[in-house]
Amino acid sequence: MRLSQRCDIIKIMRMSRGMNNRQLAGLLRSIAAAYEVKGENKFRVVAYETAATAIDHSLTEVKDLWKEGNLKEIPGVGSSIASHLDELFRKGRVTYFKKVFKDLPQSMFEILKIPGIGAKTAYKLALELGIKEPKKAVERLKKAAKRGEIRKIEGFAQKSEKEILEGIKELKGRKEKMNLSFAQELAQRVIDYLSENGENKDIIRIDPLGSLRRMKATLGDVDLAVATKKPQKVIKKFTSFPEAEKVVVAGENTARIIYHGRQIDLKTMSPEAYGALLQHFTGSKQHNIHLRELAQKKGLSLSEYGVKKRIKGGKWQLRKYKNEEDFYKALGMVWIPPELREDRGEIEAAQKDKLPNLIELKDIKGDLHIHSDFPIEPSHDLGQSSIKEILKEAKTLNYEYIGLSEHNPSSSQHTKKQVINLLKRKKDYIDKINYSRTNKLPIYIFNGLEVDIKPNGELALPEEAFKYLDFAIVSIHSSFRMSLNEATKRTLEALKHSRAKILGHPTGRKLGIREGFDLDWEKIFAFCRKNKKIIEINAWPNRLDLPDEMVKDAVKNGVKMVINSDSHAADQLSHIKYGVAVARRGWATKNDIINTMSYNKIRKILKGGE
DNA sequence: GCCGTTTTCGGCCCGACTGTTTTCAGTCG
């Protein structure tokens, strides 16, 4: 991910005034690479990389921070980098950066994108092969490798050529990140194979690691940990996975294979030290760096093996940890749930034992965004399962209630009267089920609807039709390209309707397909809190919308949310777990999420204002 | 170049793996 963000520097400098965070981060990483080649102080190199990462992770556009004079709020951006960025935004160029890039072939930054090639190698290759044109750099390198020209360069040999060719292939076939649900599926298959469904005696424990364990919405690769006394046997079994396309590396305790075109890493550790391994490779990187810095101040050193303490004679003594709880305790803090480990304040909170009591899947008492197959003739996709099938599934999830929220009947193909009749029919049908239910059938059905927000902020449903609903989820499904002000106005206008209780998939993002649209979230959140509107956390695996960092903002702003599956078939109700993961990553507790409430309480919220 | 409940100077996270080397540099996570 890191490398692919590096763009053509000249182009970037030209468009700098409109640069987004990704491009800025790429520019700073290129500076770091240039410094590395020039043998600059390595801490200066690291400083630029740190600043780049911080910008990548920044929730606010750096350009906006600049406008407000708050560039230094970004951790890792000090007075020097801040002044360079200031010049960049003002003049569209940085004299000092130009000087840094001087004498370096532009092409090296293209070659740098190839996995396995770092700054020094890229520079050496560009120079020795006389590659100047950035656009043709990778192609020319490929040809040189094929012709055996690279092995002639000092420090390179036949294997280097092979590695470069493989790297180029990987660069070209580089896939978009995968969704959490897909990654979980891949991981589960490997886990089932390795553990022989729990029968493999060599495996004492097996866990996901990395962003999978942290439940990030999208992931680049899958990491797994195994506690074992026989690492070689486990590694052997792993690298013999029959469905693997390739074994990339196989060491004594770790290995990497390619499966479904995805990198799967395995790390093994003895059970006595498993806690440290789990902690170390769960990350995130930023979280770990922060922890190690803290440890260092206490004279400790952290690694995947445990905590090292300096003893007499300058020697180190290693202390191992079976579990993560003891590891964190040794650092003077309580255990931190993996979903929080992003260095967003969780370490400080853990030191004070002030971590939020995160919502759990078992807290969910219902799902308010389910599309049934009731023939409501919607403007877009109708659900595939009957209400009966949905109720059955809801029961296995121990729900107290569900909300049937199909799309509104299409307004272009129906008269007002027809729309009203359709809603009447649905209400009658639901009333009948609710009315006929005995005390033994405890799931109550709310009669909802997902209503389109038109570009002007009106709702795509005749006013008279609303009285047949318990509540409406209002969502944007069209005209995604609007200015921030227009889109904000549009959304607020829609939320003003007394029956509009929930803002559905608020940013409209589709992972790997389109970015969410920009709204003035401060305004939206303030409106929602004041008017008791609910923001949805849509658990559909390629939406996961609100995004977790915005959930954190919503929590901070006292805005209530609801976690919904947006199911279009009964077996999708279980997707709710991904929404819970998003909520947890956003520091949400049970109190922040309304569908943790009992039926009687949520009823007042949904049907309030009648 | 950044940063500060032992610091405004003097530190700066840790280790595996690989290839090309005879002890290490580069890359990666």
Image (spheres, grey):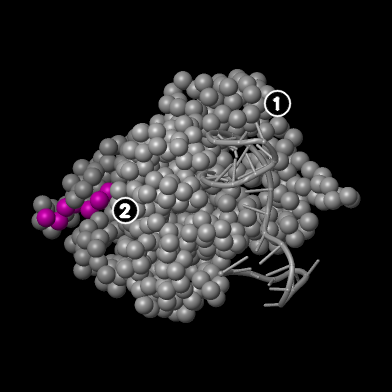
Residue denoted by label 2: A133
Residue closer to the observer: B27 or A470: B27
Residue in view at x 44 percent, y 23 percent: A243
Q: Range of the magenta residues?
A: A405-412
**Badge 2: chain ID:** A
- Asked whether residue A567 appears in the rendered view, the answer is no
Estimate the x, y position of residue A494 in percent, counting from the top left.
28, 67
**Badge 1: chain ID:** A
Q: Is residue A136 above or below residue A81?
A: above
Residue in view at x 67 percent, y 55 percent: A291
The amino acid at mark 2 is Glu
Furthest residue toward right: A312
User: Is residue A40 toward the left or the right of residue A516 in the image?
Assistant: right
Estimate the x, y position of residue A370 in percent, counting from the top left.
34, 46
Estimate the x, y position of residue A224 in percent, counting from the top left.
56, 35
- Specify whether residue A409 is painted magenta: yes
Residue closer to the observer: A585 or A424: A585
- Asked whether residue A20 appears in the rendered view, the answer is yes
User: Is residue B14 toward the left or the right of residue A65 in the image?
Assistant: right
User: Is residue A271 toward the left or the right of residue A543 in the image?
Assistant: right
- Specify whether residue A422 is painted magenta: no
Estimate the x, y position of residue A514 in percent, counting from the top left.
31, 53
The amino acid at mark 1 is Lys
Residue denoted by label 1: A229
Residue in view at x 33 percent, y 56 percent: A515
Label disc, if present, on residue A94 of the rendered structure: none
Residue closer to the observer: A111 or A285: A111
Name the dominant secondary structure of the magenta segment.
loop
